[in-house]
Image (cartoon, rainbow, N blue to C red):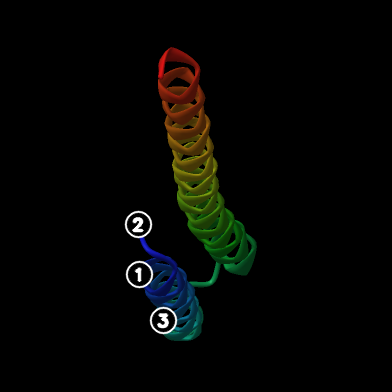
Amino acid sequence: MFAKERIFFQQNIHKLIQQNIKIEFLKLNNSQKEEKNVDKLLKDFEEKIINLFKKYNEEWEKDIKLEIDEKMEQQNKVFNDQYTQIKKEINI
């Protein structure tokens, strides 16, 4: 991934989480009017929010791993190019 694509991806994940949190708040508010068991509603709400952040963290970790892999690949290419150049110079 390129840097711009990565930033765009991160911003979209952040927006998605914000939207999901708002949706869960609205659901919680509506459910409180209908249901008497507020403790259960709050626990369900907390679990949903925790799962959203877990999902976000998993995506973030994947993105970091991809970035590390890209940098390693670039460094390997530079090393291989330098090695090839030195080898050519020695053989000349």
Quadrant in which the C terminus appears: top left
Q: Are marks 2 and 1 in contact (CB under 8 Å)?
A: yes
Residue beneath the point at 45% across and 77% down: 11
Q: Which mark is residue 5?
A: 1
The percent coordinates of residue 36 (x first, y second) are 53, 72
Q: Quadrant of residue 24?
A: bottom left
Q: Quick check: 38 above or below 58?
A: below
Q: Are marks 1 and 3 in contact (CB under 8 Å)?
A: no
Q: Amino acid under label 2?
A: Met
Which residue was labeled with disc 2?
1
Residue beneath the point at 46% across and 69% down: 10
Residue beneath the point at 49% across and 38% down: 78
**Callout in the foreground (1, 3):** 1
Which residue was labeled with disc 3?
19
Q: Mark 2 or 3 closer to N-term?
A: 2
Q: Amino acid under label 1?
A: Glu
Secondary structure of the residue carrying tag 1 is helix
